[in-house]
Structure formats: structure tokens, C-alpha cells
Image (cartoon, grey):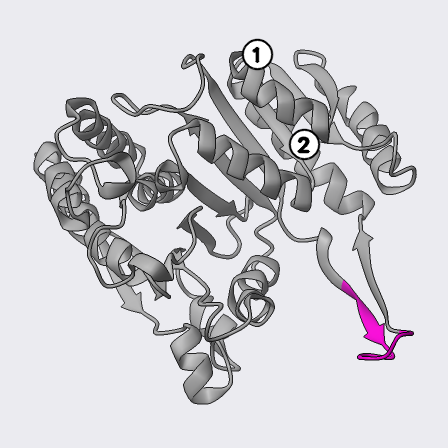
């Protein structure tokens, strides 16, 4: 009997539909070659929908997504039409929080043939970002708006449960890799939340004597990612710090067009979501020149999560073979290839 996986597609805004559409041929080819099927349902949730209905997704949107095994998302946002604070809090963040996708995984390494801005190319960093609380908890408010007495308050929320579980997730990933974990804070300046994070790190570390833990301040590890990225392996950080570090990681791996991500619900009780790190890039939307590598890599991570590891490895190997050739480069890499050219080449490599 054919294995079947229900996938929710949210192409979103800008170049999102283009990179998602390009990835479908590759995913369907991988599924057919490896003996499973992907039952895909497309959702038109986007800034266009917000302009038409006043909502990024319908009121029962989370319930509509719940039966799916995974979500593949293109991009969210079109700031010239809808403020980012509206689009982000109306779609992406509710999905992450409602499905308890507390572990955001972002791998950073150079694919064969890809070039980055650093002298060092021998790095393989896995950033683990806390994904549901911390600095993006949305706790706060504004009073006396528009007056000289206006006050804005944004409160970070760190719970013992939230900090401990993301640290344990990071330790587990480090145990599977090199046995090295870097924990990121700013505890010299933030004497409550970040000192708390450091204390929980030390408590959890007792259960992982086989993992070497190194603590870094956010500014120090940002410098290390540039000067000596090969010295890092698994990095675990809060929501804000992880967000910033992983954009830096994308830069050193060749740009946002190469950066995948996975929003994971580790106990698999609810769907996980996979998405490229890049934004919606409205300036190039509709031109068919977006780099699909990050989306294809995210799709490979999705296949791994679904238990189709052989297909995930094959997709990533095909992607690496295409980038290694160096023949098909999209404009962000100084080439002239279009989005579909790259995706079709990857699909061809799969066979």
C-alpha cells in the first residue's frame, strides 16, 4: 500500500508562489521514485487575501491546517500593501505557536559550487532557534499614542518549560553530530532573562555529559560566525537572537536564496512547517528569477521529517549536483537562469 502524506501548501506573497510551484515538480518526482504520495492542498492565504477580507487567513485557518502532516510555505509579507506586523502576526506566528513548533532548525553550510563572502568554507553550522516565546511573545502595548507622552512596552517572556525544552532539543542535535553545543545569551546586560537561560543551560547540561557546552554572548558569536565559522557546530539561541544569527548564517552560506528552515513540533502531535528563510522579495515578484534552492532544501528537510529520509537525501544530493555544476545560476548569484530552470534540473538529477 502506497504511503501517503497530506501536505498543506501556503505559497503566500511575492516570489512565494513562484518558488513553491517550482518545488512541486521536484517533490512529485521524489515521491514517485521512492514509493510514496504527497496529497497537497493549496491555501491562498496572503496579503492579497488580507486586502480582500481583512484577514491573512480565515478564522478557522488553524483547524484547516491541523489534519496535515506538514506545511510548506513560500513567503509572507508585502509591506507596501500590508504592514509587516500585521502579516507576520496574522499568519506565520499563529501557525508556529498554535502547533507548538518550538524548534526552528536552520542549517548553514556551503552547497557545492556555492560561494560565500568568507575565506573559510569548511563550516557546517546547525542553528536551533526557540520559536514560540521569548522576545516575540507579543506581550506589551502602547499608551498615549501620538502624544509627547507616548510609551511603548514590549516584554520578553521566558518560561522554564520553553527554555529547557529548546535546550534539550539542542543538546540532542549536538549528540547526533559532533557533541559540541554553543548556547547564546547576553547575560552580562540582560540580568534576568538571559541569566535565567544560562542557569537552565547548566542544569540541562548535567544530563548530557557527552556534549561539550560553550556559552557565548550574542555579539561574540556573531563575530565568530564571520571570523571562525568552522569552530561552531550546533548553536542554540532565543527567538530574537536566533533570528538574527540565522540571517548572518544565510549570508555566509551564499545568501538568503540558499537558506532553508524547519519549524518543528518534535513530538509530531501537530504539523511542522518548512519554509525558505528569504522574504517575499516584491521587487522581483512575477519575473521568474527567484532562487528556488532554499525552498528545495526546505522540501528535503520536510521529507526527512515525514520519515522519507531516502527521498530527502536524494533531493539534497540532486540539488548539490546542480549547484556544483555552476551552469544554472539565478541572477542573485550572477547568472541568468530562471526559477524553473533550476528546479527542472534538480528533478532531472533525481532520476
**Residue 215 inside the magenta-drawn segment:** no
Q: Is residue 232 visible?
A: no
Residue hosting label 2: 168
Foreground: disc 2 or disc 1: 1
Question: What x and y, as percent, mark residue 109?
Answer: 41, 24
Q: Position of residue 250 (x, y in %)?
A: 46, 35
* Distance (Cα) linking label 2 and label 1: 21 Å
**Who is closer to the viewer here, 97 or 337?**
337
Q: Which of 262 and 116 is in front in this view?
A: 116
- Looking at the rendered structure, the number of numbered marks drawn on it comes to 2
Q: Is residue 167 above or below residue 29?
A: above
**Residue neighbourhood size for the residue with mark 2, other residues' Cα within 10 Å, grouped as few (<14), some (14–19), many (≥20):** some
Query: In the image, is residue 144 part of the stretch drawn in magenta?
Result: yes
Q: Is label 1 in a helix, a strand or a loop? A: helix
Foreground residue, 275 or 161?
A: 275
Question: Residue 164: x, y in percent?
Answer: 75, 37
Q: Quadrant of the C terminus?
A: top left
Snapshot quadrant of residue 245: top right
Q: Where is residue 194 in the image (x, y as percent from the top left)?
A: 83, 37
Q: In this view, does 190 lie above or below 201?
A: below
Which residue corresponds to mark 1?
Answer: 231
Q: Is mark 2 on a helix, strand or loop?
A: helix
Q: First in sequence, mark 2 or 1: give its number.
A: 2
Q: Is residue 91 left or right of residue 257?
A: right
Residue 103 occupies which quadrant of the picture?
top right
Q: What residue appears at the point 39 percent right and 36 percent down from the top-left corner? A: 255
- Left of 49 or right of it: where is 54? right
Quarter-wise, where is residue 312 in the image? top left
Q: Residue at x 51, y 81 (%)?
A: 55
> Above or below — where is 83 with respect to 231?
below
Residue lying farthest front? 148
Query: Which residue range is magenta in the image?
Result: 139-149
Amino acid at each position: 500500500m502506497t504511503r501517503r502524506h497530506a501536505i498543506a501548501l501556503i505559497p503566500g506573497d511575492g516570489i512565494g508562489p513562484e518558488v513553491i510551484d517550482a518545488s512541486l515538480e521536484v517533490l512529485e518526482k521524489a515521491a514517485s521514485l521512492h514509493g510514496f504520495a504527497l496529497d497537497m492542498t493549496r491555501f491562498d492565504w496572503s496579503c492579497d487575501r488580507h486586502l480582500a477580507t481583512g484577514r491573512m487567513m480565515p478564522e478557522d485557518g488553524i483547524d484547516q491546517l491541523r489534519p496535515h502532516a506538514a506545511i510548506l510555505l513560500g513567503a509572507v509579507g508585502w509591506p507596501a500593501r500590508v504592514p509587516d506586523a500585521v502579516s507576520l502576526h496574522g499568519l506565520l506566528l499563529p501557525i508556529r505557536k498554535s502547533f507548538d513548533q518550538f524548534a526552528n532548525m536552520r542549517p548553514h553550510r556551503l552547497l557545492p559550487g556555492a560561494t560565500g563572502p568568507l575565506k573559510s568554507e569548511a563550516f557546517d553550522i546547525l542553528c536551533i532557534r526557540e520559536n514560540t516565546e521569548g522576545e516575540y511573545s507579543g506581550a506589551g502595548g502602547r499608551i498615549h499614542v501620538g502624544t509627547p507622552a507616548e510609551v511603548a512596552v514590549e516584554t520578553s517572556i521566558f518560561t522554564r518549560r520553553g527554555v529547557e525544552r529548546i535546550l534539550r532539543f539542542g543538546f540532542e542535535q549536538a549528540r547526533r553530530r559532533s557533541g559540541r553545543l554553543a548556547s547564546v545569551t547576553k547575560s552580562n546586560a540582560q540580568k534576568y532573562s538571559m541569566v535565567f537561560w544560562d542557569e537552565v543551560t547548566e542544569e540541562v547540561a548535567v544530563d548530557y555529559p557527552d556534549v561539550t557546552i560553550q556559552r557565548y554572548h550574542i555579539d561574540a558569536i556573531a563575530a565568530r560566525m564571520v571570523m571562525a565559522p568552522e569552530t561552531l557546530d550546533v548553536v542554540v539561541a532565543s527567538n530574537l537572537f536566533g533570528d538574527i544569527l540565522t540571517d548572518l548564517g544565510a549570508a555566509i552560506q551564499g545568501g538568503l536564496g540558499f537558506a532553508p528552515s524547519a519549524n518543528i513540533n518534535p513530538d509530531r502531535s501537530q504539523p511542522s512547517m518548512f519554509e525558505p528563510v528569504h522574504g517575499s522579495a516584491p521587487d522581483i515578484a512575477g519575473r521568474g528569477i527567484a532562487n528556488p534552492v532554499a525552498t528545495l532544501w526546505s522540501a528535503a528537510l520536510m521529507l526527512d521529517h515525514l520519515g522519507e529520509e531516502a527521498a530527502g537525501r536524494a533531493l539534497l544530493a540532486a540539488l548539490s549536483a546542480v549547484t556544483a555544476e555552476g551552469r544554472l545560476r539565478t541572477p542573485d548569484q550572477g547568472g541568468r537562469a530562471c526559477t524553473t530552470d533550476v528546479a527542472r534540473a534538480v528533478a532531472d538529477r533525481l532520476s
